[in-house]
Image: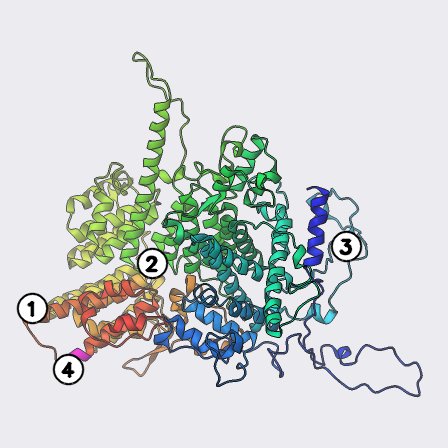
Amino acid sequence: MCSSHTCCRNALIHAFRPSVQRTAFTWSVPEYLAPAFLVPASRRNLSPAKRPRFKRDISFRRPYATFQTTFAPLYPPEILRDTFRGCIPRPDQRLQHDIQQWLTLLEPYIPLHLRKEPSDKTNTALPASATDLSSFLIDGQKASHDLLSYLALNERRWNTATWLIHTLVENGPSALDSAAPLELSTNVIWPDPHLSLEEVTNRPLFLDRVRPSRTLRQSLDEITSPPVSIEYEHTLVKSAFGQVWRSLGNMILAATEVDNEQEASEIMTHVLEIIAYLHHKEMIPESIYLDRPAQSPFALQQPPMLHLLSSQIFTALSDASWNAREASTNIERDKMNASYFFGREIPGSRFKVAVAGMSPEVWLELVLWSCLHGGWLLDGMAILEKIMGDSHGKHPWKLICWQEFMNASKKSETSTQKSWNIFGGTRSDRCEPDYRKLTQKRISSEVVTAFVDGLVSSMRVGVGLRGTDPATLLAHIKNLKQLLDTNNLSLGAASWDSIIIRLLESEGINPEKRPELLLQLLDLSANFGQEVGSFNVSPPSLEANGNPPYFFLASAAPIGLLHRAIRSFIERGNVSGVISTLTQLQHYTDNNKKRSMTEFFGKLKKIPPVRLNTHFESIFAPIEFPGFHPQIPLPLLAQLLEFSTDTGASELGRWLLFAKDIDGPLISPNLYHNSSIAASVVRFGNMVGNDNLVMKVVKISGQPDERGVVRLTAEVLTAFIISQIQMHRWETVKKMQTYVLENPGYRPRPEILASFATELLRCSTQTKREMAQLAFTDLLYAWEGLIVTNLRAELNNILIMLSTVHDDWKVFCSQFIMGRGRERVCLSTREFNRILGGVLDGYGSLQGKRMVEMWCYGGNTQELIAYHSPGGLPTMPRYKVDKGKEYSRRPENIEIHGSSEETLVFLGRVKPNIQTVRAVLRKAQEEEDQRQKARVQLTDEGKTELREVIGWAVNLLRYLGLDYEEIVDNLGSLGQIEHDPPSAPTVLGFEDKLQT
């Protein structure tokens, strides 16, 4: 940069900006913490005879008296954030869609000369502080209204919009206040500036202190006080300033869309006046003009456009500020009919030099970078999304990568300073026609990349009200990715897979609780060759060997996260989620293969044809890309097949085993030797009645012993025992009991006892029930040692659950209960669902609902709150919950009174999943279908019970994290029956949808 440029810029900065010295914020300090602050600083009287008595005065004032005129606690209560609405009323909920309703309510608080229709009823405007106006603007924003833009663009009331902005700035706290750095670690003299990390950390260093580089502008009280940014007034006004930036962006976009140049010039004149005022009041961060050359060409860096054009920007803003002052003075002069010595003009206006304006693209860049550096990410994101909405017109907005443009300019021997003059200047020869056309209606891709990086760092992590909801954040980032993909651009400084990893490492998303967010997150993943083939990964940016940098190489993160999503959906019992995740995984791998083959044949066409007598040899190196195959681990495949068996999704199981795809099924016969896979295949084969499949698995997975006899693995043996129990083949079950005793080493599983309990409950006749009870008794006595050693607690759980179903089971179960006193509920969700299936088949949906209510956690418990929290992460309480409250939140203990006046107490509950509720709904649907088929009318009591079951199911499904559409799918035809709206977590419009 030349010296004249530097001097001109410095002169403009000093002339245009006031001093950076601010009035410091002060805080009330308790006596016991700082008693010295109670006495004003003064020179001590050395005479012992007379000492002045100082009055205590600990009332500190803030620089803005409009916010707080009385004492308020240092940390305002949480309720203030929800109940504060300001003095300006809001429209009725049904009328908030009409922006005129908002403006009508705002009109009495505007000065008389700025109103749309001055009223004679009131002589003065009603008082409204900056906090009141901020709250009103934010509420209007929540109702999808931009009040400032509407006043300026639609009603041409620029003075009113400017007055509102001036009121926010002058009567409110600065939105950019920050504590001055103490520089405790920088003001030292190091013995050697080239010390390694090992030398610094393994031995002590003796450092000399130096005087600070500048005097601190804050006192000890100000430095040790809590930051101003945690004050609600500061947060509220800062959010309102975000609306100001959003309005400025909309005004600039409107100026680029109008065909009338005079109208566009008028809009930009007022926009520059507002930006100049914000500059004067130091509301624009200084960092937007800094240019720090990056050490790496792939580092995230702001283009030097604002830095190189800063002099022209300040000149244009100064000119706009002068024009605004001249216009306002002319209005006052006309009112007073005043004249000056040199004429009716303002002194000096005759000799004003005409300044050429900058293009709107520069001011839009300035607004976007100000939003980024000032912390108004969501407001800047709203401007970018508005640009995306305008991209479907005749002249859509596009992106330009200035890094690549500067590289091309260097090749063509064009100076960097001349390249930036394409945005406008004072000389016409600086702006080449081709370059101006190139930059028309374009913004830099670097600002889009910077917003992606900023949004990733603003994830909500459950602490207070900070951060952005993960679902909203992902929607914004996907919009930015779509904007980059449309212009064939990538992030340039990182890969999309690294963005996915950063979002997960922020711990704002819990994939086990909200796996549907994980699927939305994986939409950011790029396909094969997509990032490497983008425009801003050009040959000059490649490494010396012609390969892209390491961070552009593909990773296995999308595949691994899809596997994690499948596992989470299985644990939640969500069939549709499992199927949609498998479909997404299949599409991801198929698209990568298709793109790879397309690229290969495209390269093949460019090479010379081979000779007919020679063998084909590929000249291309093999590609190693982890996204070509699903690569599902064997344990997860086994869980998938088990899940299809438990839920009755036979089509899913057949696709896993017998798919006709080119790559074959996911579970091929060569995987049957795995014990987990073999057990799952046996269960599925028994469910669908495929005996040939079962025998094939036995032959492959069987392990011959020393005598040559095939011995089944523990998992396969458990699957066979359960299948025989389900088919009521009690003699075969007895033979397997003997086989287990003759071949020691087998540990019985709790699912065997749960399956036995299920079949006991399903027996429809007395004869079948007696036979099942006899088989169950023989099993308990035959395996008494194994059960007492391994399954005593699980057996007690199952027996007590059976005894609570009906009084007939109390006597039978009481003879096998081992131990008295306190027990903990230790059954898994899957085992409980097995028993629940027997209760539903034997006693109906109403009894199944009562069992779930008795033995499972309810919707209002802490165990289920994560399923409907943003990102699956509950909000951290403001104060640590003590042990007493934590104990009181636990569900009540289940007390079972025996016949001998002994009481067995069970602690805890089973955590339900979606399959728990779906089982009850399926049974209720079957009962309703049977009644309709038999043409039996429900009684009033029966209708009440059915509505009770449906309402309970809707509540619990909502607490388990399902949205409205998913709940309707689970209800089926039962959703047409009227029921009470759920008392689940409040979601806007959820209750209204259910009632309709």
Q: CA distance from mark 4 to mark 2?
A: 38 Å
Say what secondary structure mark 1 lies in.
helix
3 or 4: tag closer to the N-terminus: 3
Q: Is residue 946 magenta?
A: no
Q: Which residue is mark 1?
A: 933
Q: Mark number for residue 940?
A: 4
4 or 2: tag closer to the N-terminus: 2
Main SS category, magenta section = helix
Side of 468 relative to 986 (left or right): right
Q: Which residue is mark 2?
A: 571
**Of 101 and 967, the residue lying toward us:** 101
Amino acid identity at mark 3: Asn
If the image is split into quadrants, where does the C terminus sit?
A: bottom left
Q: CA distance from mark 3 to mark 4?
A: 83 Å
Q: CA distance from mark 4 to mark 1?
A: 19 Å
Q: Inspect this view and state whether residue 67 appears.
A: yes
Amino acid identity at mark 4: Asp
* Residue 856 position in % (x across, y down): 32, 71
Q: Mark number for residue 187?
A: 3
* Residue 937 position in % (x across, y down): 9, 77
3 or 1: tag closer to the N-terminus: 3
4 or 1: tag closer to the N-terminus: 1
* Residue 616 position in % (x across, y down): 33, 18
Amino acid identity at mark 2: Glu
Q: CA distance from mark 3 to mark 2?
A: 55 Å
2 or 1: tag closer to the N-terminus: 2
